[in-house]
């Protein structure tokens, strides 16, 4: 079963990691690289990416003429999606275990961040017709 694990971080402008001490940034990045390497080695990683900050985000919708209409920037959001992993695991419990591991990534002073990681199953087909 595939699950998407989405890393949500506090808002308040561009990535707060930019305000950390260099050694803390390096430790955090090393943790994330090691996490991705372990998922790759176990065969559970489908995809993973970090995302640009909300200061670069735009909401896009089609206008009446079909042309894109953009809205944004929204740098003062309460929290934002910083990155994601798509994993292929045996079931939700394993996805929750992996999300908890990612949540504990080190932050300033090496303390676990305990970030919110949203876990949602990737649907392989539309839901069954209730009729």
Image (cartoon, rainbow, N blue to C red):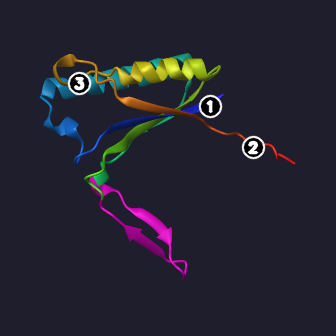
Residue at the image point whose x is 24% and y is 42% from the top: 15
> Which secondary structure, mark 1?
strand
Q: Which label is found at residue 2?
A: 1
Residue at the image point whose x is 64% and y is 21% from the top: 91
Nearest to viewer (mark 2 / mark 1): 2
Using the image, determine if residue 69 lies above or below residue 129: below
Q: Nearer the viewer, residue 128 or 32?
A: 128
> Which secondary structure, mark 2?
loop
**Image spot of residue 127 (x, y percent):** 75, 43
Horizontal side of 112 relative to 124 (left or right) equals left
Horizontal side of 87 relative to 81 (left or right) equals right
Sequence-earlier tag: 3 or 2: 3
Q: CA distance from mark 3 to mark 2?
A: 39 Å
Nearest to viewer (mark 3 / mark 2): 2
Q: Which residue is mark 3?
A: 107
Q: CA distance from mark 2 to mark 1?
A: 15 Å
Q: Which residue is mark 2?
A: 127
Write the start and end of the magenta stretch as one range.
55-73
Does the magenta portion include 104?
Answer: no
Horizontal side of 7 relative to 127 (left or right) equals left
Q: Nearer the viewer, residue 102 or 75?
A: 75
């Amino acid at each position: 079963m595939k699950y998407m694990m989405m890393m949500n971080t506090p808002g308040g402008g561009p990535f707060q990691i930019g305000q950390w001490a260099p050694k803390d940034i390096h430790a955090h990045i090393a943790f994330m690289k090691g996490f991705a390497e372990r998922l790759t080695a176990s065969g559970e990683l489908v995809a993973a990416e970090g995302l640009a900050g909300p200061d670069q985000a735009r909401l896009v919708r089609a206008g009446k003429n079909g042309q894109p209409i953009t809205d944004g920037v929204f740098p003062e959001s309460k929290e934002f999606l910083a990155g994601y992993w798509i994993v292929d695991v045996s079931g939700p419990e394993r996805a929750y275990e992996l999300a908890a591991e990612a949540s504990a990534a080190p932050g300033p002073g090496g303390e676990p961040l305990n970030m919110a990681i949203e876990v949602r199953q990737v649907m392989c087909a539309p839901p069954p017709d209730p009729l």
